[in-house]
Image (spheres, grey):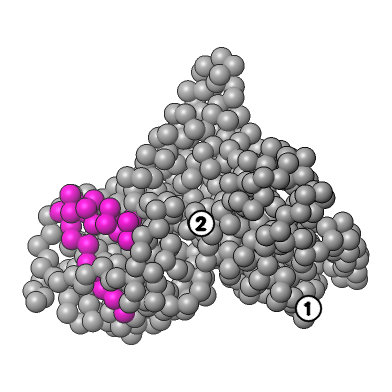
Amino acid sequence: MITVQLSMVNIFWFRRDLRIHDNPGLALAGKAGQLLPLYIFDPKQWIGDPYGSRHYQFLCDSLEDLKMSLLEQGHILVFRVGDPAAILSSFFEEFNVGALWASQEVGDHCARDRDRKVTQCCSAVGIQFEQVPQNGVIQMLENRDTWARQWHNFMLDDLVTLDAQPSSLIIRSDAMPCPTIFGLSGERNSNIQKGGRACALELLSSFKKTRGQHYSKEMSSPVTAFEGCSRLSPHYSFGTLSVREVFQNIQRKRKRLRENKSSHSKAWARSMNSFSSRLRWHCHFMQKFNDEPRMEFENLHCGTRGLREECFNEAFFESWKQGQTGFPLVDASMRALKATGWINFRMRAMLISFASYHLWLHWVRPAKHLASLFTDFEPGIHYPQVQMQAGTTGINAIRIYSPSKQARDQDPEGMFIRQWIPELGSVNTKFIHTPWNDPGKVDDYPSPIVDESHARREAADRMHSLRKSNGFANESKEVFKKHGSRARVLRKPSTKSHQLGLF
């Protein structure tokens, strides 16, 4: 039963911001009057790609944590299941609603369509829909000339928190729905990272104290990255941590390191500098997607349209998806990702590069498949990054990763390969990266599905020829004008700054 209150109610609608600390929209909503915290399980989000059981598991962990945090502040988190516009309309009828509040979200087409409908719903009854910035992404940005400076200023602003205020609202809450309602697995996967702010803070603490010392060296190899990377990426994606609070945390660490001149501190300083720069690149790519959401479906550079769309090889795609391409590091990376929901950036880039160049697959379906596997899937980063690796932005260097060279560089002893490809467990280290050269036959591991050198050369020729075509350079200038980094506003970036991914 609902008891209607005469006082003004401010609804805060949680989406990708599952925290009470440094949640600007939530803090403002709490100050504006009686607060009604709300989370809506939208069936449209969960039925079909790209979201699946691993994302739902992380979400539910995070919501349980959020529910307890709100309770400590005197607030009840209300759950509803159904269409957001319809559910919010029912709240507008039942309560004297002052405003609907939410954090700005850089969402995919489903999220944008949802927000359009909610905006129309609010307009129809004269209720303001306030969407508050939370991560340095700027709406209606005219150009990129001042973005880096504005982002930096936002990151240095004071953190905010929700004031404790016991709620007088009495309102029922739906139970958190079982994943099987949405056709998802009800079994918990222990290999997937656990969600919730408490876990996020533990990761941040251990990264700052011990794990992050050699981050700049360990992030590229899958042998060391699982421990050496922060592993905070899903927490950014679901919003259990804000990028701003992590940035300020790391800035304090860097300040202490500058005051300490030991060799031990120098290693730490390099790693924290590298990590800090990636926080900015994290938001840089989200800004790109915010400004050009068609990147979810269309090649950013007009001159690359039609490049691969008409020649999709289904057999190659299936082999790539299953980790059965015959290239050990590619297959080990895909299998590790399927099992754990995470792989480091360099391996992500290699997976897309291999699919785009060696297999000559149009990026849209590989991107959707990877999104379904990444627990930390963030649309605003994922699609610009995929297009960058696929060579369809027109402003980034053509990156054709050699899977054999990457294997020798990043897994020289084959430790990671043997962990995820047991079929190669007995192969001599001399042949672990090229098992097709092993005199002893490996019966249950496939031969390479393409000739690496030939496929690479053919892809490079196509790409370089395209970039020399009439009008390509002029279009590239326009793309850069809108989306190119102006990082030098702050400082000259390292040549590796583009290699952030989801770290």
Q: Is residue 80 magenta-colored?
A: yes
Quick one: label 2, few (<14), some, or many (20+) residues within 10 Å? some
- Which mark's residue is nearer the viewer, 1 or 2? 2
Q: Residue at 51% of width from left, 56% of height from top?
A: 339
List the residue tagged with mark 2. Answer: 339
Q: Is residue 474 magenta-colored?
A: no
Q: Secondary structure at mark 1?
A: loop
The spot of residue 227 in percent (x, y) is: 51, 38
User: Where is 145 relative to 120, above or below?
Assistant: above
Q: Residue at 49% of width from left, 26% of height from top?
A: 255
Q: Which mark is residue 311?
A: 1
What is the quadrant of the N terminus in the image? bottom left
Looking at this view, is 461 or 394 the one in front?
461
Q: Is residue 84 visible?
A: no
User: Where is 389 relative to 11, above or below?
Assistant: above
Q: Which mark is residue 238?
A: none
Q: Is residue 414 left or right of residue 464?
A: left
The spot of residue 233 in percent (x, y) is: 49, 50
The spot of residue 348 in percent (x, y) is: 63, 54
Looking at this view, is 20 or 389 the one in front?
389
- The amino acid marked with disc number 1 is Cys
Q: CA distance from mark 1 to mark 2?
A: 30 Å
Q: Secondary structure at mark 2?
A: helix
Quarter where residue 181 is shown: bottom left
Q: Is residue 273 left or right of residue 442?
A: left
User: Where is 214 relative to 288, above or below?
Assistant: above
Looking at this view, is 376 or 489 the one in front?
376
Q: Residue at 32% of width from left, 45% of height from top?
A: 198
- The amino acid marked with disc number 2 is Ala
The spot of residue 321 in percent (x, y) is: 63, 66
Q: Residue at 47% of width from left, 29% of height from top?
A: 210
Which residues make up the magenta segment? 60-82
